[in-house]
Image (cartoon, rainbow, N blue to C red):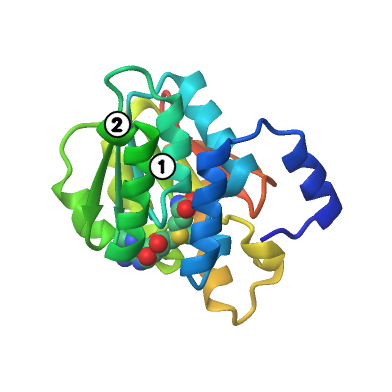
Amino acid sequence: MSFIDERVEQYAAEHTSDDGELFRRLEAETRDKTTAPQMMVGRIEGRFLEFLVRLSGARRVLELGTFTGYSSLSMARGLPEGGLIITCDVDKETTAIARRYAEEAGLASRIEYRLGPALETIEALEGQFDLVFIDADKGNYGNYYEAVLPKLADNGLIVFDNSLSSGRVVDAGDDGSARAIAEINDRVLNDRRVECVMLTVRDGMLLVRKRERA
Ligand code: SAM
């Protein structure tokens, strides 16, 4: 999924460190067994998430939207010893694929899988999170934002995926999914509790941090 020139996207991917053979197999199996493989973050965004985790020193990460695990595996690589990702999804088949690859990669002890609607999962969570990656159903992004903000550590980061909705946010019109994304983009921008930066990585990523003094 890309709305920049495909050759440029390809060039960027080729100049991003290779994820290795296990990720290639995960990608192939996802293409083979799921109907929307483009939901995987892929190499560029996966590496970027790994960098964010590593550079921020995040120890507790929450992910909404596990799918087959490309992003959780990527982020798990960036965690320090003893770090943990809690990831949730409503789909038990894709979660089983994610779990299998995490086990094979030796990263299963860093990832906890929860099955069920993300809002219920968030409600049941204790403790604070250093990084929250929001990549589940787009219509609930606003609800996810309000639910995770109180659980965000002081220097924590929220990352929304698909913030450009293939460019459709610019003129969302009657497009429900693009409108939901455009609404949360506007809400975050105007929320004095936080600061944000939107990146044109892949389908857009909105990075949000709490202001030191709101
Ligand atoms: N982060 C994943 C990756 O890189 O492979 C992709 C996530 S995919 C875009 C979105 C996922 O959200 C799907 O696997 C879907 O089953 C899940 N999902 C949809 N509605 C959900 C909900 N209410 N609660 C939790 N997960 C949900």
Question: At 52% from the left edge and 66% from the top edge, which residue is drawn?
Answer: 32
* CA separation in Å, label 1 and label 2: 10 Å
Which corner quadrant holds the N terminus?
Answer: bottom right
Q: Position of residue 155 (x, y in %)?
A: 40, 24
Mark 2 neighbour density, 10 Å: few (under 14) some (14–19) many (20 or more): many
Element class at badge 2 = helix
Residue 128 visible within the image: yes
Which corner quadrant holds the C terminus?
Answer: top left
What's the mark number on residue 72? 1
Q: In the rendered view, tell whether residue 135 sits above or below residue 57.
A: below
Which residue type carries mark 1? Ser
Mark 1 neighbour density, 10 Å: few (under 14) some (14–19) many (20 or more): many
Which residue type carries mark 2? Arg
Left or right: residue 87 versus residue 78 is left
Q: Nearer the viewer, residue 189 or 144?
A: 144
The residue identified by callout 2 is 110
Q: Position of residue 35 (x, y in %)?
A: 50, 73
Decide which of tag 1 and tag 2 comes sooner along the chain: 1
